[in-house]
Image (spheres, rainbow, N blue to C red):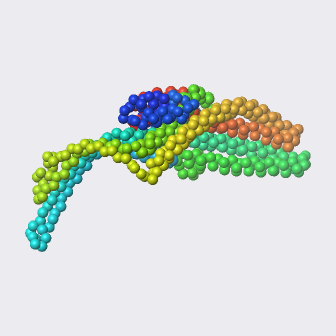
Amino acid sequence: MIDNKMTRGVSVGALAALLSGCGHLPIAEPAFEAMAVKRAGMPADWTVAPMTGDPAAAVADYSVFQDAQLIAFVQEALENNRTLRAAIESVRQSEASLQQTRSRLFPQLGASIGASATDGGALNASASDVGYSFALTGRYDVDIMGDLSASIQASSAGLRSTEATYEQTRRQIAAQVARAYFTVIEQQQQLELDRRSLDRQRQTFRITQTRFDAGSIARDELVLGESRLAQAEDSILASEASLRSAVRALEIALGRFPQNKLTLGGALPQPPATPPLGLPELTVRSRPDVVAAELAMIQAFANTRIAELGPWPQLDANLAAGLQNTALNTASDLFSFDDLALSIGISLAQNIFDGGAIDARIKIASSQERQALERYGQTIINAYGDIVASIDQFNTLGSRNVALQKASGAAQEVLRLGELKYQEGSESLLNLFTVRDNAEVAEANLIANNRARLEQWVILHAALGGNPTVSQPLPTPANTANGTR
């Protein structure tokens, strides 16, 4: 899993000050100056939220429902979902890419040993020679121009962007499981409502049949009763199909093969209170998609700096050590270091003509930088839009729930009185069906709204990027995107 310390905070303003003081990172100053100018109007004290990689944090988010079965399902999905497994492999690939880039910071050491035999040939058939060789080479390249530091920063930001994307995937899967779980329970309750309706229709039809046989009602009421009974049976079949579909969706979210083998019990839990909304900066910066966009922007600046170094003369310096020993018919002095040679080299190279290749690379990198900036800005706008819409919808569903409870309670009382009147013979069958439809629709709407409130809480929770009341760490040299973790 991802290390618990990965993807710490990045404050753009503070990060510029931190990195400008690091002599080994010549990319920092121009990159973050450009960022400060081009992201004008966006929060200057941005901090990237930590992406822990710990599934316990995502599981704990859903403990507010106090539903052990839901928590168990979320845990199972985070362990078994194949989409999440694929996402973690992307993180591991980025880790390996950063490791590969950082390897250029260290000296390169190589060694070889060999032996060969030479036949004397026809003129000297009895003679043969055995040659031995041993070579040792070492080299260290000095990052004078800063292209290696820029590459490390780009790889580091790319890794953390991938980690944030993984975090986003994980939270989406947890939310998908919760929403699918609530849908299954809702469909079970709707099926139970349809079954109660069928029982009432059968009881009513028996009374209608008795009255028709006694000649107290006309045939049209009997046919109407038959029609409503058939409709109730059809509703049962439709609800059973919807329930099976919901169960399969939950099984897929859990990483299981869809076989309709899940059996759930219990009712829909009460939705928690509206998550508290803190300062916009504290809220939006907790979202993994904003984190990923921020780091993608940092990576784009680093790549642009690398491309901009292309037209300049390339100054390279290296320290090298070499040893080449050979011996004939003996290996006694093969590993002697008497001939070890040390060298210090420096070179200056300038590309004179390349047909515009370097200029094209700069244009591509600059375009990608502008693209990352625009995507980052749109990601923030979308994040604010998600939060505002989610809060409004959650509050609306809460207000509707009060009205629907009143409507359902009143409709149930009207139905109770209507059934008594019908049994006494003072209510027509058509009027009974009307009040029964009203009561069943009101109860079905209340069930659907209860499920929608739970689902909207999950959506709002995701829009807020987790728990917005948890403070994010301030940037330090240890948690910035300067190539260290």
Give the percent coordinates (x, y) of residue 422.
85, 40
Q: Outermost residue, bottom direction? A: 122
Answer with the quarter of the image where residue 374 lies.
top right
Count of marks, rendered view: 0
Q: Answer with left or right where residue 343 lies relative to residue 408.
A: left
Residue at (50, 35) in percent of width and height: 34
Q: Answer with left or right where residue 474 lies relative to residue 465.
A: left
- Relative to 460, residue 242 above or below: below
Give the percent coordinates (x, y) of residue 316.
32, 43
Residue at (40, 43) in percent of width and height: 312
Q: Is residue 267 visible?
A: no
Residue at (19, 51) in percent of width and height: 324
Give the percent coordinates (x, y) of residue 102.
36, 42
Q: Answer with left or right where residue 73 lies relative to residue 144.
A: right
Answer with the quarter of the image where residue 156 lies.
top left
- Relative to 123, residue 47 above or below: above
Answer with the quarter of the image where residue 306 lies.
top left
Residue at (62, 43) in percent of width and height: 184
Q: Quadrant of the C terminus?
A: top left
- Relative to 405, residue 126 above or below: below
Q: Nearer the viewer, residue 187 or 42?
A: 42
